[in-house]
């Protein structure tokens, strides 16, 4: 047997080889990817499987946070921060407060589930076919899906925000505007559907206030001395 030479005190250890460091980084990235992806899939399933709407919103926030982790692994730090600040900090929290504050009878809402089941099943089948077609095209010809994509500049030349803005506000500007109009219509529709006029509630009427005159507003009564009205 050949014994290894003893290391004297104060002797510096040999530095790790670049190849070993690259392998370690790849393994570490793979572990974080499977961690974030697994938690995201589990949270997304619990969003639709949970019976309590408050729990569903909490799982939705967890899915958003892990999706932000996936964006960071891809090098899109701006999209990760945008997902956390906008969706988790505003949209998901707003959903949570709305669900907790509104007295919604979910038992009554579930009674009409079978009525919309055929339409939902048709939409689900269409989405499944599209996913299978995209997955099949990616397996058969991996270069076909990315052939028509806009080439992205190197990250060393431009920042992440500049790369996204140069594509979003040039080639996809019309789609961006259409998405904004769709969100505006959805917001107006939600306001119209949830607006309820309760009886016996005083509300301000600008036309009635403008049309008031002295005869309708002021009433003069003669009060006898020593007596009240």
Image (spheres, rainbow, N blue to C red):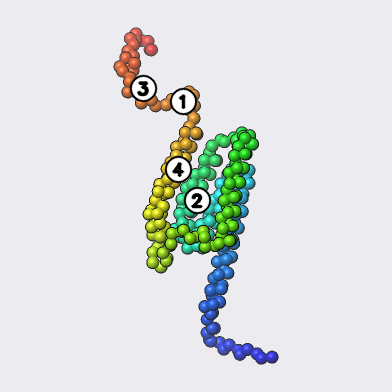
Q: Residue furthest right?
A: 1
The first of marks 1 and 3 along the sequence is 1
- The residue indicated by pointer 3 is 208
Label 1 – label 2 distance at C-alpha: 36 Å
Label 2 – label 4 distance at C-alpha: 21 Å
Helix, strand or loop status at disc 4? helix
Is the residue marked by circle 3 packed among few (<14), some (14-19), or many (20+) residues within 10 Å?
A: few
Q: Nearer the viewer, mark 3 or mark 4?
A: 4
Quarter of the image where the N terminus is located: bottom right
- The residue indicated by pointer 2 is 88
Eyeballing the image, is 196 above or below 124?
A: above
The first of marks 2 and 4 along the sequence is 2
Q: Nearer the viewer, residue 45 or 8?
A: 45
Residue shown at 60% from the left, 37% from the top: 116
The location of residue 167, given as percent across then percent down, is 40, 56
- The residue indicated by pointer 1 is 201
The first of marks 1 and 2 along the sequence is 2
Label 2 – label 3 distance at C-alpha: 44 Å
Residue 182 is tagged as 4
Residue shown at 38% from the left, 54% from the top: 170
Quick check: 212 left or right of 182?
left
Residue shown at 43% from the left, 41% from the top: 184
Label 3 – label 4 distance at C-alpha: 36 Å
Q: Nearer the viewer, mark 4 or mark 1?
A: 4
Label 4 – label 1 distance at C-alpha: 34 Å
Q: Are marks 4 and 1 in contact (CB under 8 Å)?
A: no
Helix, strand or loop status at disc 2? helix
Q: Nearer the viewer, mark 2 or mark 4?
A: 4
Quarter of the image where the C terminus is located: top left
Q: Nearer the viewer, residue 192 or 97?
A: 192
Eyeballing the image, is 46 above or below 76?
A: above
């Amino acid at each position: 047997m050949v014994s290894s030479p003893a290391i004297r005190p104060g002797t510096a250890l040999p530095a790790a080889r670049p190849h070993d460091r690259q392998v370690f980084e790849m393994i570490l990235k793979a572990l974080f990817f499977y961690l974030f992806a697994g938690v995201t899939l589990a949270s997304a399933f619990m969003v639709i499987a949970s019976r309590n709407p408050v729990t569903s919103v909490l799982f939705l926030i967890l899915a958003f946070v892990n999706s932000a982790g996936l964006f960071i692994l891809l090098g899109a730090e701006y999209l990760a921060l945008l997902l956390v600040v906008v969706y988790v900090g505003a949209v998901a929290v707003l959903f949570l407060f709305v669900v907790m504050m509104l007295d919604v009878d979910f038992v009554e809402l579930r009674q009409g589930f079978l009525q919309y089941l055929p339409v939902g099943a048709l939409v689900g089948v269409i989405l499944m076919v599209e996913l299978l077609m995209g997955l099949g095209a990616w397996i058969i010809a991996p270069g076909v899906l990315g052939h028509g994509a806009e080439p992205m500049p190197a990250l060393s030349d431009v920042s992440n925000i500049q790369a996204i803005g140069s594509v979003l506000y040039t080639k996809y500007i019309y789609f961006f505007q259409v998405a904004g109009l769709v969100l505006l219509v959805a917001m107006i529709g939600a306001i119209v559907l949830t607006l309820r006029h309760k009886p016996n509630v005083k509300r301000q009427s600008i036309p009635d206030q403008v049309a008031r005159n002295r005869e309708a507003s002021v009433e003069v009564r003669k009060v006898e001395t020593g007596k009240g009205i």
